[in-house]
Amino acid sequence: MKKTALVLVHLACAFVLISGACKSPSNKKLKGMWLSKDGSKKLNITDKTFAIDGEEAEDYFVKGDTVFTSYQGNLPYTIYRIQKLDDHSLKLMLPDSVAVEYSR
């Protein structure tokens, strides 16, 4: 009986760890093609890449309200803060502390 309980506890822990590891690292609302309100900047976010104004796409991950990007995994990360995000608008604080509003 003790062996069965121990195996079940280990299986439950493994399930929790695996389910956490398989979650998507990015927000579904964040993905897509964005255009700044003034039309000067384009932002393209896919499952794996983040590119502004047609520059070379960078790898990224999202943690809370912050987007961390890096070119081919190199450090240091470039940090973008999400100030507002919904289905049709995005307000992003760029690394140089300039807020840019995007829409789809």
Image (cartoon, rainbow, N blue to C red):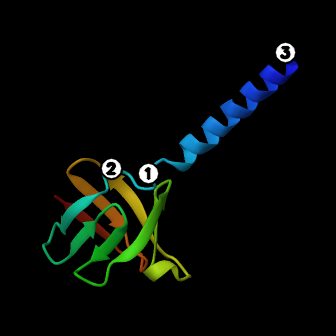
Q: Is residue 22 left or right of residue 39?
A: right
Asked if disc 3 and disc 1 are in contact, CB closer than 8 Å, the reply is no
How packed mark 2 is, by other alpha carbons closer than 10 Å (few <14, some 14-19, many 20 or more), is: few
The quadrant where residue 84 appears: bottom left
Q: Residue at x 42, y 73 (%)?
A: 59
Disc 1 residue crowd, few under 14, some 14–19, many 20+, Cα 10 Å: few
Residue of label 3: 1
Q: Position of residue 72 (x, y in %)?
A: 45, 81
| Residue behind mark 1 | 24
Residue at the image point whose x is 36% and y is 75% from the top: 98
Relative side of 30 to 16, left or right = left
Earlier-in-chain disc, 3 versus 1: 3
Mark 3: give few (<14), some (14-19) or many (20+) Cα within 10 Å.
few
Residue 46 as seen in the image, left or right of residue 66: left
- Give the label, 2 or 1, closer to the camera: 1
In this rendering, the answer to whether 20 lies above or below 64 is: above
Whole-angstrom CA distance, mark 2 to mark 1, is: 9 Å
Counting residues from the start of the chain, the first of labels 2 and 3 encountered is: 3
* Quadrant of res 55: bottom left
Residue 103: horizontal and vertical position, in percent? Answer: 18, 59
Alpha-carbon distance for marks 2 and 3? 44 Å
